[in-house]
Amino acid sequence: MADNDPPRLPIVIKKYANRRLYDTEASVYITLDSLAEMVRAGREFVVLDAKTGDDITRAVLTQIIVEEETRGRNMLPLAFLRQLIAYYGDRMQGVVPDYLERMMSDFANQQVQLRSTVQRTMETLLSPEVSKNLSPAITTGMQEVGRQNLEMMDRAMTLFAPFYRVPDASEAPDVAVVPVAEVGGELSALRAEVAELRREL
C-alpha cells in the first residue's frame, strides 16, 4: 500500500446463531482458520453478532486460541493459564492486559530486529566484497545474531515472571498459584542455558 493510500478499514465479519462466519467484504462464509490467517497476515477485522450487532471480536479470537491449543500446537504454559484465570476478579486484573500487550509488543519488535540482523548478515556475505571480507563479516554478523537471540531469551524469561507470586494472606485459599520453588527451578535451568550460549559466542 502506497504512503498516500487511505488506511484499510477493518473487515466486518458477522457471526450467526449457527456459528457460521460471514465475510462482508468478500461476501463469503469463512472459518476460524480463515480468521487466523487474517491475523497472521496483519489484516484487521471485527466480528459482530449478526443478530444483536454486539462486538464479539475478543470472544472469537479467544476461540481461535482454544482451537490451536486443542490441535496440539501448545504455546500457553499450564502455569500461566492457571495464574491468568486466578487474576480474574483480582485487584490486579486491570493491570494485566496492559502488561501483556506491552510485553508481546516488545517481543514482536525483538523478532523484527533479529530478522533484520540476519538479513543484513546474509546480504554482507553475498556482496561483491565477500572474498576479502568473509571472515570479519561472519564473525561480526553471527555475534550480533547470537546477541539478539540471547536478548530475546532473556526477555522471554521475564515475560511471565510477574504471574508467579506468593498469595497474600487475605486471598482465598483455593486460588491456583504456581509453587515458587517449581518456577524458580525452571527459570534457573533456562538461565543456565543462556549462560552456556554466551560462553559459546
Image (tube, rainbow, N blue to C red):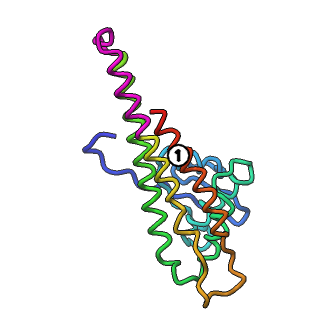
Tell me the quarter of the picture where residue 171 sits: bottom right
Location of residue 188 with respect to 114 vertically, above or below: below
Q: State which region is magenta.
A: 127-147
Tell me what residue is drawn at x 66 percent, y 50 percent: 31
Q: Position of residue 60 (x, y in %)?
A: 62, 62
Q: Position of residue 52 (x, y in %)?
A: 59, 74
Q: Position of residue 119 (x, y in %)?
A: 39, 29
Q: Hey, what amino acid is under mark 1?
A: Arg
Horizontal side of 8 relative to 49 (left or right) equals: left
Q: Which residue is mark 1?
A: 40
Location of residue 29 with respect to 1 vertically, above or below: below
Q: Position of residue 154 (x, y in %)?
A: 47, 51
Quarter containing the C terminus: top left
Tell me what residue is drawn at x 37 percent, y 18 percent: 125
Quarter containing the N terminus: top left
From the viewer's side, name the closer residue of 32 and 175: 175
From the viewer's side, name the closer residue of 184 and 57: 184
